[in-house]
Structures are given as C-alpha cells and as structure tokens.
Amino acid sequence: MRRGTDHPLTDATVDLMDQIAAAAREYGRPDSADLLVDEVRVTRFAGSVVVVVGEQKRGKSSLINALLDRPGLLPVDADVATDTRIVVGYAPEDVATVISTDDPQGRQIPLDELTRYAALGTDGTPAHPNVERVEVGIPAPLLADGLILIDTPGIGALVTGHTTVTLATLPRADALLFVVNGATELTRSELAFLGEATRRTRAVVFVLTRTDTFPHWPEVLERNRHLLREHAPGFADAPWFAVSARLRHLAQQEAAVDPQGAAQLLADSGTEVLIAELRLRVLLRGRHARLVGLAETAAAVLADLESDQRQRLRSLSADADLLAALSARQAELATLTAPEAPWRSKLAERFTDLLAELRTDADARIATLLGSAQAALRDGGREALTSVPADLVEGSRGLVLELENLINVHAPVIAVQLAGELGLDGLTARRVDLRAPAGARGLAPDLIVDQAAPTGTRLPQLPWLPVDWTTRAGPQLGTIAARTAAGYRQLGPAGRNVALAVGIGAFVALVAGAAAMFGRLAHQQSRDRLRAQVEQTLRQLAGELPQVLASTVDDLHRELVTQVEQRLDGVRAEVDSEVRRVLTDRADSESRLGPQRDEVRHRLSRLQTLGEDLSALRHRLDGQG
Ligand SMILES: Nc1nc2c(ncn2[C@@H]2O[C@H](COP(=O)(O)OP(=O)(O)O)[C@@H](O)[C@H]2O)c(=O)[nH]1
Ligand SMILES: [Mg+2]
C-alpha cells in the first residue's frame, strides 16, 4: 500500500518498539511483547474514518467523487438519492460489496450496479431496503494513505432512521465532514444535528459546496459561522472549506488540453486545500496520536520490566524486607480469590446499574420509534406507507448501534475501575470487543474493505470502529493505541490483557428480526393495518428486549469475572514462585549469586538505555504534535 502521508517518526517509533518488545520477551514478559507488537501492527495499518454528512442534495456524493477524481463513482443525480451508507476505502482494483440482511457476509457486485443498491428507486422507495451498507474499494491515492470515507444518506429530522444511524456512527469515526451548500444558510435540522453531534465527534470539518453556482456563498458562509456560534458553539472554531466539485472535474478534463487553465480551475475548486486538510488534520494527526499512544504503552511496559528486575536484584541481594512484602501480597491475594471477596458483589452491582441504563435507553428509543411512526402515519401522505417501514428498519439498526456504543462506553470503565481497586498489576482492559470475530477489528483499512462482514450476526453493522470511550477528553484524534495506552496507564503494567470478547448476538438477532418484520410491512394498502402492525412489532420488541439485554449484560459480567479470576490466579502463581526464588537465593552461595546480580544489573542498564531512547522519542513526538 502506498503511503504518501506518513508520519516522519513512524520508523523511529516502530524500531524502538521492536527493541522494547524483544527485551520484554527475553526478560520473561512475552505477553507485554505481544501487546506491543500487536499495537505496532494496528498503528502501521490503521486508517482514519471520515463520515460525510449533510442534508440531501447538498453535494456529499459529488464531493467524494471529486476528491477521489472519479466522477461517476458514487451515484449523483438530481433525482437519485443515496439511501444507504457507502464505505469507500482503498483496494488495488475496483471492487464493490453489498452487505445486507440477506447477505450479511457481503456479496460482490459490479461497481456500475452501485446505484441499484445504494439509491432510492424512481418511486422514492428503497429498491433494496435490506441493504445495510455497500463497501467500495478503489485504487485512489488519497485512500491508499489510509483514508476511509463514508457517504451517508441525507440527514433530516433527528428522529428519522437514517439520522439515528449516522449519529450512532460518529463516535466510531475520526472525523465528521459536514457538507452544506452555498445556496442557503444552515437549516434548523442541520443545526439540531450538529448540536447532537458535538458530544459524539472528535473533529469536524465543514465544507460548503457548489461555489460555482452560488456567487453569494461567502455571505452564506459568514452567516453559517454565526449560526454555529449560537447553536453549536462546540463547532464555532471548526475550519470551513468552500469547494466546487464541478470545477475540479472540469480541471481534470482540461488538464491535457490547457494545463494552465486546468491549474486555475483546480485552484478555484478549493478542493486541493480540503485534501491537504484531510491529510494533515485527519490522517497525519491520527497517526501522530497513535504513535504517542504507542510510546506511552512502551513506557508502561518498560516500567513493568524494570520493576521485575529490581525485585530480582533485591532477592539476589538478600533484601530482608522482600519476603515480608511478598507474604503480605500472598495474604491479600488469598482474600481476593476467596468466593466471598467483596469485589464480586460490587461488580455485580455495577453490571446491574449498566443493565438499568441500557433498558432505560432502549425503552426511550423504542418509544421514539413508535412516536415518529405514528406521527408520520397520521400526518404524512401516501408515501408514509413505504417511508415508515423503511425508517423503522434503519431505526432498528440505529438502536443496535447506540446500545453497542453504550456498552462500549461503560464496560471498559467497569473493568478499569475493578482492576484499580484490586491493585491488579497487569489487568488491562484493552478493548471491549463485543461482536466481531477475532481479527476483524482495528485492522488495516484495506482489510476492513476487503474483509467480509462479521460473522454470526444477522444485522451486520458498519465496519466496527472502536468507540471513543474516553469521550473528548482523550487525544484529539482518539485511536485504538492511544486509548489502549490510557487504559494501560490507569491499570499499571500490562502483559495480560482483559479483552472482553462477548457476543451480543441474541440482542442483534432480536432487533434484526424486528427490522426484517418492518421490511416486510412496506407496500401495505392500509394505514390502519400498518399502524397496528408497527405497534404490535414494537410492543413485541419492547417486551423481549429486557430479557435479551439482561443475558447480554450477564455474559459480559461473567466474562469479566472469569478474566479477573484467571488473572488473580496468575498473579498468585507469580508471587508464589517469587517467594520460592527468594528462598532459593537465600540458600545459594555468594559465588553463584554474584554473577546473577551482574546479569540483572546489565539488564537494568539495558532497560535504562531503552528508557532514555524512549524519552527522547517522546520528546520529539511532542515537538511534532
Ligand atoms: N454546479 C455544481 N453542482 C453540483 C456540485 N456538487 C454537486 N452538485 C449537484 O448537486 C446535486 C446533488 O449532488 P449530490 O452529490 O447527489 O448530493 P448529496 O445528496 O448530498 O449526495 C447533483 O445534481 C450534483 O450534480 C458542484 O460543485 N457544482
Ligand atoms: Mg448522495
């Protein structure tokens, strides 16, 4: 994969990580070594996801086509509206895959059939309501650098299905690219969306399109800034880019004939500045945050290794207090591993709270789905007979995504808290992998694009993007590595990680079942019948949800308990063997202890050198930030 936008310190960082991983392996911490190697892999390949959002016909799809210099790529037409998410990433050759309820694994389609699957039909209803997303891979240079662009259906009222899904996607992306056009100022629904988005996104870039058609766009832009200050102050300082997709296409056509004119058109299109911004702010900053996270993880690993060796030195030097300290730790661990250890009930309480929160949230969302369906059936025209079921299908997807978000925000916090309270060196809540099979997440963008959707689910989601559970407090562009490091720092030495790999399959299946029901309700003849069926399906969903949520949370709880128990057993075994070593060392002769001390001192000095190199690197990273 071509990497034109690489961070200047990538090689230096990766090289040092390799050295630290090697030391960890040599000095008896293979898990820490694996952790580092794993994170390096993620850092090398992780791309940045940009969700392109805006109302219908603002020029989102045209903009993506222009940025990729592929005029016909995404469906653009006065009367063809995008009706599903189109995820565009790098692939060495053109490829398109439809992920639908019928084909959760994905089914390859010719790229030129994209419109058929991704757009509304001529009668204004989805031609393929079961399509969850389409993944498109093309060999565009901008994507080769790791960018993933997600084209979305237009946002409307906050409660509509499409908008719900788009909002739920934001915490999983690196940036939001918000598209408006130069004709009119931000609408009420756009401002409402942005208000909601403030809590959910790390970075936003505003793009005002069609500057070629709307000469008064500068006034519109000024007015928009003003409106943002008033209605979404969190975005008041976000950058704005005024562009014309058309001028970029014209420039492309002119390039061979009139290079000078083409260069002027390209400059006038404003798109080059936007591309530079995407490279700099999104790609490069994402990489930077990942490198910083990696360096932080490495620092914690080093501290861990050093503490091991210091303890070893104490033992070899017949430190009188060491045995007492180890015995105290043994006693403490004995209490913690007892069946009546207080952490168990405390943990149970936290999961009970989580369940309550999930239920409240789910109930509220189902009530909203019902309310807006009823309103549309009461007030809408005939099109409500098709739009309401379609909206409910999307609304169900949004429900799953939002509940996943909630679990992903809370479950790691519970794990982190517990680890802190148990004083468990090495209990690290790295990531809560809720659904995807091992290896399907946090992978290279090319893998995300190439890979089939997660297996074992009936309602496949957007490619899983790690949820930002540090919210906005973390690095500007949160990343797996940065967040992993945050968890690591809170929890002390890593090495043995708690990855909560729990399926929420039952939950997904339940909601997918409801979504499929809604899908079948389209083209009903009577409003009253449709209303009755919608109400019945939602009631059924609301009725079954508590049980399914309870068992999901129960699984999570059990999984964490198992992990903690295993970890406690591991620590116990470690401390026990340390005690045995202390006793052996005591019985040993000075002629044998001396050389061992020398070896440990040698190790400590190697670790110290690595530590100095790491400090220097972190300093350089700070300077680049
Ligand atoms: N003149 C002009 N028209 C544009 C430009 N960008 C988009 N359009 C037109 O605006 C309409 C809506 O564009 P589209 O990309 O489908 O909007 P979307 O619904 O936000 O994805 C289409 O007819 C496009 O041809 C532009 O930069 N200049
Ligand atoms: Mg579109």
Image (spheres, rainbow, N blue to C red):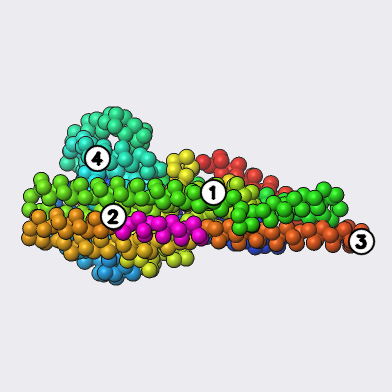
Q: Main secondary structure of the magenta part?
A: helix
User: Tags 3 and 1 in contact by the CB under 8 Å rule?
Assistant: no
Residue 589's mark? 3
Three-letter amino acid code at the position of disc 1: Lys
Q: Whole-Å distance between the Cαs marked 1 and 2?
A: 29 Å
Q: Which residue is mark 1?
A: 346
Q: Magenta segment: does it hold 458?
A: no
Q: Which residue is mark 4?
A: 190
Tell me the residue at 37%/43% (across/down): 200
Instruction: Answer with the quarter of the image where residue 37 lies.
Output: bottom right
Magenta residues span 543-559
Could you say whether the residue bearing mark 2 is in a helix, strand or loop? helix
Residue 58 coordinates in the image, percent (x, y): 21, 45
Q: Whole-Å distance between the Cαs marked 3 and 1?
A: 48 Å
Residue 542's mark? 2
User: Tags 3 and 2 in contact by the CB under 8 Å rule?
Assistant: no
Q: Residues within 10 Å of mark 3 (few under 14, many from 20)?
A: few
Q: Magenta segment: does it hold 551?
A: yes
Q: Whole-Å distance between the Cαs marked 3 and 4?
A: 78 Å
Label 3 or label 1, whichever comes before in sequence order: 1
Three-letter amino acid code at the position of disc 4: Glu
